[in-house]
Amino acid sequence: MNLLRSVFFALLQTALTIFFSVVALFTFPFSAHTRYRTITRYNHALIWLARAVLGIRYVVEGREHLPTTPAILLAKHQSAWETVAFLCLFPPVSPVIKQELLKVPFFGWGFRLLNPIAIDRSAGREALKQIVAQGREKLAAGFWVLVFPEGTRVAPGEKGKYGIGGGWLAAETGAPVLPIAHNAGEVWPKNAFIKRPGTVTVRIGPVIDSTGKSAAELTRAVEAWIETEMTRLPPAAARQ
């Protein structure tokens, strides 16, 4: 049954991606915020389909921690689910992504108009400078910045090396930091075609004030909170 659901979902996702990539091209003359509101209808549609077809639901805990000013979101990275859902669950977000994603046919065309921070991850310190320069602009324009500090998706129960890019941006701009834990990888596994029904828990942590803190200090604080909370999240399949 999960295989049939996953096949049906993949077909619908492909059709949606092609349709919204064309829609995205027509938003080019509009402001960044107008483009964002229009293009992320794709994200809303995909998350709705994930619920209706795959049985993947979600709950969000800790919304009371969201500040009133743009912040830097530093989140666990397990799945493709959060790359889609977080653009629905939070205020307008500018995600930090690898440049190669913009070259993906259809998907990359729309993503380019979503105001991301696209970096060359092999560039080392130059990539950090790019995150700070573009991140400062995005924050000033009212966009929150989304960073997955592990850089790549990791399987449930595993931990990647936390990079300092998001912490560096926070230290340089003084923007508040929000750590985020979730267990999407349990129902939408990394690189897996077959998805499983269940409920993703997204847990938002208390704001971490970046004032007077170094990038390393902020990164350690985020890592400690996220990895502790990962052990406390309920199994994703527990709330079907």
Image (spheres, rainbow, N blue to C red):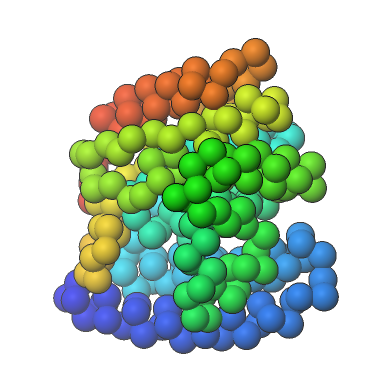
Q: Is residue 151 left or right of residue 118?
A: left
Which residue occupies 57% across, 57% down? Answer: 118
Q: Is residue 112 visible?
A: yes
Q: Position of residue 190 (x, y in %)?
A: 27, 58
Q: Position of residue 179 (x, y in %)?
A: 49, 32
Q: Residue furthest top?
A: 212
Snapshot quadrant of residue 215: top right
Which residue occupies 32% across, 45% down? Answer: 183
Count the marks: how many?
0
Which image quarter is the C terminus in?
Answer: bottom left
Q: Is residue 171 left or right of residue 103?
A: right
Residue 35 in the image: above or below residue 171: below
Observer-nearest residue: 204 or 218? 218
Q: Position of residue 88 (x, y in %)?
A: 57, 57
Observer-nearest residue: 33 or 119? 119
Residue 109 in the image: above or below residue 97: below
Which residue occupies 47% across, 65% down? Answer: 100
Which image quarter is the N terminus in?
Answer: bottom left
Q: Is residue 199 left or right of residue 130?
A: left
Q: Is residue 173 left or right of residue 56?
A: right
Q: Is residue 89 visible?
A: no
Residue 32 in the image: above or below residue 45: above
Q: Position of residue 232 (x, y in %)?
A: 29, 29
Observer-nearest residue: 21 or 7? 21
Which residue occupies 73% across, 34% down? Answer: 68
